[in-house]
Amino acid sequence: MKKILLVVAIFLFASAVSVLAADFQIMSKEQLRAKLGSNTITILDVRADSHWEASKNKIPGAIRLPADKFDIWSENFHKNTPLVLYCSCEGLGTSGHLARKLAEKGFTHVYALTGGWTEWLLNSYPVAHK
């Protein structure tokens, strides 16, 4: 009986992980850095207003789109456009949440930047003035 419960639990966990992974993908800071200037992706800065206003910089080429205006700006992109979202946190807070919402709307190439703006800065990666 314990083995059956363990097998069921593993199956349910694996199913949940695969569903979450199918929602959106993650992109490392190294992968994004390699794509800068290539015109193959659109970078979306979805940092909270307070973090955006406190900073003088952004990732080069990034478009500032406030998270609270998601329903408006999400309609302006083609669903096959590769989109990379980043926020301030090292986790996938706002960027992961919005990437999942885009995937639910049918966007097919959605990425959340791991480490976000914080990791980008800590690694002295290129920045652009806002």
Image (spheres, helix red, strand yellow):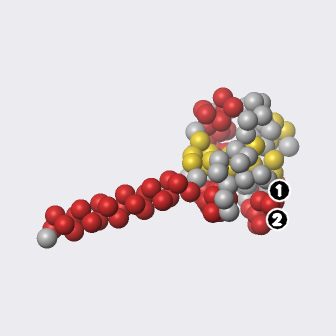
Q: Are marks 1 and 2 in contact (CB under 8 Å)?
A: yes
Label 2 sits on residue: 72
Residue that lies at the very extreme toward the bottom in this rendered image: 1
Tell me the kind of residue under disc 2. Ile
> Would residue 78 be found to the left or right of residue 27 on screen?
right
As drawn, the label of residue 97 is none
Front residue of 66 and 110: 110
Q: Quadrant of the C terminus?
A: top right
> Would residue 91 be found to the left or right of residue 108 on screen?
left
| Residue at image location 66% in from the left, 59% down from the top | 106
Percent x, y of residue 16? 42, 62
Q: For residue 9, what is the image quadrant?
A: bottom left
Front residue of 58 and 14: 14
Percent x, y of residue 56? 82, 44
Front residue of 59 and 101: 101
As drawn, the label of residue 76 is 1
Percent x, y of residue 66? 78, 59
| Residue at image location 84% in from the left, 39% down from the top | 129
Kindly tell me whether residue 82 is visible in this rendering. Answer: yes
Tell me the kind of residue under disc 1. Asn
**Which marked residue is nearer to the observer: mark 1 or mark 2?**
1
